[in-house]
Amino acid sequence: MSEKAYEWFEKGADAYKKGRLEEALEYYERALEINPQFARAWNSKGTILAAMNEIKEALKCFDHAVKNDKGLSEAWINKGALLYSLGDRESSDEALGCFDHALQLDPKNAEAYYGKGMVLNSLGRHEEALEYLDKALENKPHYLEALTGKGVIAYGLEKLEEALESFNRALEINPDLYLSWHNKGLVLGRLGKMEEAVESFNRALEINKNHAESWVNKGRALKVLGQDEEASKCFQEAIKINPNLKEIIPD
């Protein structure tokens, strides 16, 4: 490893942490000019290009990274995450292979379990997805994305108590997750706990008063509780934010 290449790499990492992406990209490219086999620099360059929505170039960088270091699990995970974000079936299938590579290299890698779980969910394999998110949480119990993802999938599978536990755990870690308060409210509503559901929607709106779906679902819960006037006010707030919601708001 060239000492100069590593110096440029470290400068790139520092610039990246400070949000200076163009500067970081330049530093990584300088490192690669000195050492074209520098796998970590290829991986980091790919991460920046992905953030800039340069998808094809980012994928090429991740390919260079794993070509030069087949044991670099982070590059497999980054490539898998980027492929998953494309949303098509072929890319999703390829993403599964990337996460499998990462797990072969590191069987306790929570990010790889999470990534594979989310891809499986997108492919309609919800039960399998839940298993992989559980494995992610076994290895990283405070993994927020896995907790919230598990909550959403469990809710869709009508595993309401499991979903509620996941959102509660996420909110213990970070009480400012308005989407988790909203989703918790949905679960409580399905469990028939309307007053608690309203409280959850209120918490979501305290954090983000412009979250139209929280206004809609708070209104629905209030309507079930017989508080029609308050429900109507919630629906009006939702329509102010998103006029298209008028079509789904109950009379």
Image (cartoon, rainbow, N blue to C red):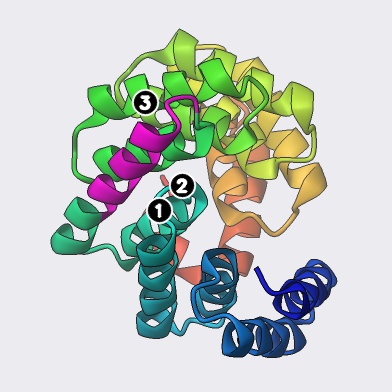
* Position of residue 85 in the picture relative to residue 48 (left or right): left
- Circle 2 residue: 73
* Position of residue 169 in the picture relative to residue 59 (left or right): right
At x 55%, y 71%, the residue is: 38
Residue 143 shows in the view: yes
Q: What's the magenta region? A: 95-108
**What secondary structure is marked by label 1?**
helix
Q: Nearer the viewer, residue 9 or 48?
A: 9
> Residue 48's quadrant in the figure?
bottom right
Query: Vertical placement of 71 versus 65: above or below?
Result: above
- Circle 1 residue: 76
State the separation of the CA atoms marked 3 and 2: 17 Å
Which three-letter amino acid code belongs to the residue tagged 2? Ser
Q: Main secondary structure of the magenta part?
A: helix
Q: For the residue carrying disc 2, how many other residues have a C-alpha within 10 Å: few (<14), some (14-19), or many (20+)? A: many
Q: Position of residue 16 (x, y in %)?
A: 76, 72
**Residue sitting at the far left:** 90
At x 51%, y 81%, the residue is: 36
**What secondary structure is marked by label 2?**
helix
Query: Does the magenta-highlighted stretch encompass residue 96?
Result: yes
- Circle 3 residue: 132
Question: Mark 3 or mark 2, which has the lower sequence index?
Answer: 2
Q: Position of residue 199 (x, y in %)?
A: 72, 25
Q: Position of residue 6 (x, y in %)?
A: 74, 71
Which three-letter amino acid code belongs to the residue tagged 3? Tyr
State the separation of the CA atoms marked 1 and 2: 5 Å
